[in-house]
Amino acid sequence: MNELIRICGVALTLLLCLTLLRDKVPAIGLSLALCGVAVIVLLFLPMAARVIRCVRGLMTATGLDDTLWAPVAQVVGVCLVVKIAAELCRDAGERTLAATVEICGAAAGILCAIPLVEQALRLIRAI
């Protein structure tokens, strides 16, 4: 919870700085946004580590194999990276580039999910 409060504080401070600086120094906006994203990601890492430990504990308790978790984790990672990249592109005024990143991200997500679908089909055939 403390991490989330810090993240929101950094985001609001960054938003205020970006709002004040964009009119005076437009070129600094994207750089400042990228630096802010880096700080927020660093603040998020401990929370992400706890989520991963919790999911691993649940998988161990249920007896599920890691091969089921890996594609899901990859798809979530792809979604997060694509969302951040697309929003940064939009922030820079490049809507077409943002849409292209999103399309490529969708394709990457599908590719990451294929092993999970294949494993589900194997389970269905075994029944």
Image: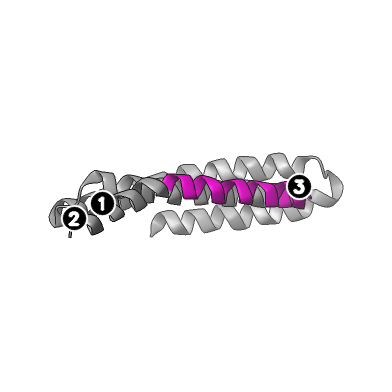
Mark nearer the N terminus (1 vs 3): 3
SS state under label 1: helix
**Mark 3 or 2, closer to the camera:** 2
Question: Which residue in the structure is indicated by mark 2?
Answer: 126
Badge 2: residue crowd in 10 Å (few <14, some 14–19, many ≥20): few
Q: Position of residue 51 (x, y in %)?
A: 32, 53
Query: In the drawing, does residue 93 fall left or right of residue 38?
Result: right
Question: Which residue in the structure is indicated by mark 1?
Answer: 122
Which residues are the magenta region?
89-112
Q: Tag on residue 42?
A: none
The quadrant of the picture occupied by the C terminus is bottom left
Tell me whether circle 2 and circle 1 mark residues in contact (CB < 8 Å).
yes
Between residue 48 and residue 83, name the one nearer to us. Answer: 83
Distance (Cα) linking label 3 and label 2: 51 Å
SS state under label 3: loop
The quadrant of the picture occupied by the N terminus is bottom left
Q: How many marks?
A: 3
Distance (Cα) linking label 2 and label 1: 6 Å
Q: Where is residue 67 in the image (x, y as percent from the top left)?
A: 27, 44
Tell me whether circle 1 and circle 3 mark residues in contact (CB < 8 Å).
no
